[in-house]
Image (cartoon, rainbow, N blue to C red):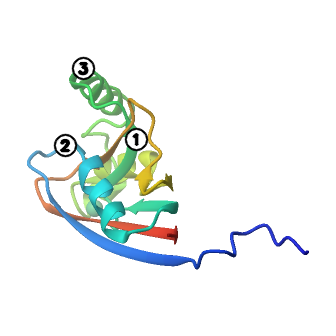
Amino acid sequence: MLNLGGASLHEMRTFLKELSIKTSGRVEFRDITREVEEAVRESGIKSGVAIIFTPHTTTGIFMNEDEGGLKRDLERILEKLIPEKGGYMHDEVDYNAYAHLRSIILGASLAVPVEGGRLMLGTWQSIFLAEFDGPRSRRVYVRVMGSD
Ligand code: ZN
């Protein structure tokens, strides 16, 4: 029998959920793992992948440990690499160039494998929305693709 390399026993499905996240700081790292896990549960998909995507140009999505000291370290290293006041050209248009630049560095999406109906995160891995121009109401899309 020809093996096309895909799972053909179970039909592939997709599910999309929009999360609405209200950030409370100008710069904030918000753990959204619980909301993403809830979306995966709602999808009913057991085996596949979840894509977590933010459609804004001054936020980012990243994964790491939810530990207070580490979050402060990240804030400090980003401030060192991309300070708020940097004589940026975009600041002549809209005073938030640092927020766009940090967003570019972190990226806008992540893909996480789903197995047994759960995100395959490591023990210390959490999913974060990074806010760089808050406080605002932000959207995060969770697209789950896979089979039952
Ligand atoms: Zn801008």
Element at label 2: loop
Say which mark, if any, is on residue 53: none
Residue 56 shows in this picture: no
Circle 1 residues within 10 Å: few <14, some 14–19, many ≥20? some
* The N terminus, quarter of image: bottom right
Percent position of residue 129, x then y: 29, 50
Percent position of residue 91, x then y: 27, 55
Q: In which quarter of the image is ligand 1?
A: bottom left
Say which mark, if any, is on residue 27: 2
In the picture of the structure, the residue carrying the numbered disc 1 is 63
Residue 31 shows in this picture: yes
- Work out whether mark 3 precedes mark 1 in sequence or the reverse, and give the earlier one: 1
- Work out whether mark 2 precedes mark 1 in sequence or the reverse, and give the earlier one: 2
Of residues 45 and 54, the one drawn nearer to the viewer in this rendering: 45
In this picture, residue 134 sits left or right of residue 132: left
Residue at x 21% of width, y 55% of height: 95
Element at label 3: helix
Q: Nearer the observer, disc 2 or disc 1?
A: 1
Element at label 1: strand
Percent position of residue 93, x then y: 26, 64
Of residues 88 and 35, the one drawn nearer to the viewer in this rendering: 35
Of residues 80 and 131, the one drawn nearer to the viewer in this rendering: 131
> Marks 2/3: CA distance?
15 Å
